Each structure stands twice: as structure tokens, then as C-alpha cells.
Image (cartoon, rainbow, N blue to C red):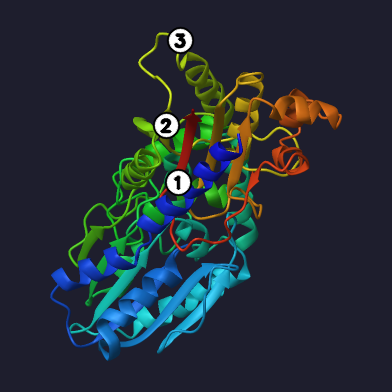
Amino acid sequence: MEKLRRDAHTIIKEAVAANLPGDGVRAALQKHACGENIYLAAVGKAAWTMAKAAQEELGTKIKKGVVVTKYGHTLGSIPRLEIIEAGHPLPDKNSLAGTQKILELAAQLKADDELLLLLSGGGSSLFECPLPGLALDDIIDVNKQLLASGAGITEINVIRKRLSAVKGGRFAQLCMPARIFTIAMSDVLGDHLDAIASGPAAPDPYTAKDAVAIAQKYSLQLNDTTWRLLAAETPKTLTNAETVITGSVRLLCQSAAQTAAELGYRPHIITTNLCCEANEAGRMAAGLAREIGAGARFQPPCAIILGGETVVHLQGSGKGGRNQELALVAAEGIEYLDGVLIFSFGSDGTDGPTDAAGGMVDGKTAAQLRKRGLSIADVLARNDSYHALEAVGSLIKTGPTGTNVNDLAMILCR
């Protein structure tokens, strides 16, 4: 089992390294005809890494810029760029302060200037300016309700866009008459431009009717101002915006498959579009593990790969994240299986509001939890997967990775 764990950590390390955004940013800039007056705004969990690569590529062509990233995701100063750390998964006062500095930068742009916008996952929380009539507390309340409801990220972003002065294409409008060139690292299934960081420089294909329907679907408790803003339309066309996508969950899965093959496993990428409840994904992963070697198409040694992003419908007040919950559910389903390990982790190095990237379990994990008086069913009811996995040494901790391309779950079997 120690061999499986070593291999799992190697796959995680190499998959993350292969999906750092620096090379993608440099390649996109080399293909783009950059002007001489470039201003930079970088937003998201990978914002520092992306901004650093842009500065190294463009040098003094970048006159000034602002980087807004999650707390703990900064790795030092960058010439001519102001760096601000802010809240995720919920915006905070620093989110507003960093956004205001970017808006001040945008207000100074002239027709011959260009704004380089670097986007990565987490941007929806980090880049925020409530529309008139709303306060930060209103935005936080709506986000909390959506996160607890089990709504998918696309549904969440449809709502977020209509409450913000910078989402849903509105930021691109504020940059006019200057052009805005966006390099986006996708953490969105299907790589939809309007959904990455809630599409600050992308036309919004969703309507006010869609937003109201989502709010009603999840029985959101909203004030009159919020209902009124949901009924207002977002920009459907933009004339000053161009976007290039670099990095995706598909590439993350391919990188993991390559490393697994080098370690002697036969890799099988089952999906790069995993989108369901975390507990459902955990049960599916356990079910696939039980089929290995039982006449199914999966024969050991093999690595079964699932990429995407699950959701958790919060019921308790415990500590955890979707990847930790997936792993914990899988632990129950693979109890007593030998030579099988399942892990799930967030490529950005954080899973939910925790310092863990995810969880790693095997056929002995469920019994180890029972020895410590922990019932998996009770833990899941409290949404307290972090403390349970911590108790048996099954947390994955990478620290901030500098990238963010969704989640990766894998079954390893020897």
C-alpha cells in the first residue's frame, strides 16, 4: 500500500507541474500582437503565477498593473504590479479594494492602450464590485446560499453576474475605448468563456429569465433590490474583447495518465466532465474499483481517471471540501479491498475552506476510522470530512500550487 501512496503523490505532483500556467501565458503572448502601452489585471488563484510569466515575457511594455489573488497564493513582488490578497470562496473587503484598484486602472485607459486580463479559477470571489443598491454583505449572503444549496458552478455564476459591476462582460465595457486581451486558465467544464471568473470580458449567453429561474429553483431568500437586479440584462455582445484559453481539466487528466503509464499502470480516462454530488462520485469511484480484475475492462495494474468538479449540498457545520467528501465516501465502498487506493484533489491545492487539497483512502481507511470512534455516515451528515481524514492521516496537502484547472480523482490498483 505504501507503493500505491508514493505513486499517487508522484502523479499529483507531476500533473500539477505539467499544468502550471506560465508556459501557456508566454505562448499566448508570443502569438498576440501586443502594443507598447499595456496595463495588466490578474485575478484568481493562479493570478500571481500568470502575472509573473507575463511580466517576464513583456517586461517594461507593462506600464502598471494589479494582481488580486487568494490569501497565501503570493510568492513575492513583481515589478510594476501591485499585489492584493483577498477572500475565497466568499468575497471580502480586500476583494472590493483590489477590484476598485483595477477599476481605477481601467478608467485611465485610452484608445491606444491595451488591458491584459489574466483570469483563473476563484476570480468570481476575488474580483467583485456590487452594483448600486447592494452591499458586500448582500453578495456574501447570496453566495453562501448558493454554495450550500448544491447549485452547480454555472448556475452560481449566472446569479453572480447580475449582482456585479464587473462580471458578465461589464468589465470589458468599462475598459472602452481600449482593447482588452484575456488569457484565461479554465476551471470550468466545457471551457465556457462566460463562466471563467464569471466572464468579466465575455458576453453573457444567459438571460434574466434564466437567473430568476435558478433563484427560484434553489429557493433563494433575496431582498427586493437583488430580485430587481436579477431581472436586468447583461451585455450580449462586446466589440473590444479577445480571449485565449490556456490549461484545462482535460490536460490535467492527460498529464496524470502519462505519469501513471510511466509508473507502470494502464491509464483509463473515464471522463473529464465529472459533474455531480461528491458523494455520488465517491460511490461511483468505489464501484469502479470493485470491478477491477473481475472480468471488467479494467485489469491491474491500472489507473482510472475522473476529472471535473463535484458539488456538496451542505447539511452540517463541519469542515471539509468536495474532494475530501468524495474520498471519504469511497473509503466505505472499498473496505477490505487489497491493492486499491482512491484519491481526489483540487489542482489549486485547496479544497473548500481548508488547507487540504483533498483526500486519499484505501481498503483499510474505514476500519481505521471506526477504531477512532468515527462513523462515516455521521461524519458525512456533519460535512466534517476534514477532521475524519486528518485523524487517519488521509489528507492530501500540497499548499497553493499556482494553477487551477478543476479536480482530479483517480483509482490506482496493483
Is there a contact, CB below 8 Å, between mark 1 and mark 2? yes
Whether residue 278 appears in this view of the structure is yes
Q: Secondary structure at mark 2?
A: strand
Residue 211 vertical placement versus 219 (above, below)? below
Q: Amino acid at mark 2?
A: Ala
x 52%, y 17%: residue: 287
Q: What numbered label is drawn on residue 294?
A: 3
Where does label 1 land, which residue?
A: 11
Residue 128 at least partly seen: no
Q: Residue visible at 78% across and 30% down?
A: 369
With 414 as the anchor, is 356 left or right in this view? right
User: Label 1 sits on what residue type?
Assistant: Ile
| Apparent side of residue 369 relative to residue 218 in the rendered image (left or right) | right
* Lateral position of residue 204 relative to residue 348, left or right: left
| Quadrant of the frame with the N terminus | top right
Q: Where does the image place residue 175, in percent across and percent down from the top left?
A: 30, 74
Q: Which residue is mark 2?
A: 303
